[in-house]
Amino acid sequence: MSFSDLMRVLARDARDALSPPQLTDARPAEPLRLRRGGFVEVDTLPFRMTSDRTNFELGKCAQPIATRGLVDLNGSYLDSGEDRRGPR
């Protein structure tokens, strides 16, 4: 690599580092390619294999996606180590 090639690479890297980031799309990507109006199907094989040890039966396994959004679990009983009956 010659000195001029090195300077060209350094100038390109500096320009890329100092330039503002390009906004590609304001809408966030769909997670797992799920979309409203689509369906999620649950694989029932593990539940069928352990049917003698479970106390429920899976019926309809296609769940429609009615909406999308964010769920904040901070401070909930799911991640705080407590359930609805109190501390463990």
Image (cartoon, rainbow, N blue to C red):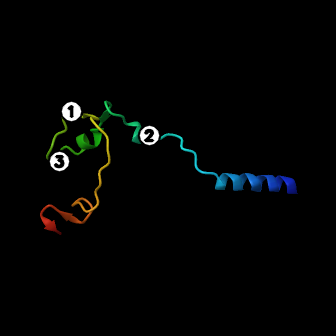
Q: How crowded is mark 2: few (under 14 residues within 10 Å), some or many (20 or more)?
A: few
Q: What residue type is labelled 1?
A: Lys
Disc 2 or 1, which lies upstream in sequence?
2
Q: What element carries label 1?
A: loop
Left or right side of 17 for 47:
left
How far from the left and from the top, in percent, is residue 14?
A: 70, 56
How far from the left and from the top, in percent, is residue 19?
A: 64, 52
Q: In terms of depth relative to the viewer, which is nearer, 67 or 38?
A: 67
Q: Which amino acid does label 3 sit on?
A: Thr
Q: Residues within 10 Å of mark 3 (few under 14, many from 20)?
A: few
Q: In terms of depth relative to the viewer, which is nearer, 68 or 48?
A: 68
Specify the label residue 60 is tagged with.
Answer: 1
How far from the left and from the top, in percent, is residue 40?
A: 31, 35
Disc 3 or 1, which lies upstream in sequence?
3
Disc 2 or 3, which lies upstream in sequence?
2
> Image point 17% across, 69% down: which residue?
87
Specify the label residue 27 is tagged with.
Answer: 2
**Do we see residue 75 in this rendering?**
yes
Q: Single out the mark in the foreground, 2 or 3.
A: 2
Left or right side of 39 for 6:
right
Q: In terms of depth relative to the viewer, which is nearer, 48 or 14?
A: 14
> Image point 53% across, 41% down: which residue?
24
> Image point 83% across, 52% down: which residue?
5
Mark 3, residue position? 54
How far from the left and from the top, in percent, is residue 45?
A: 28, 39
> Image point 65% across, 55% down: which residue?
17
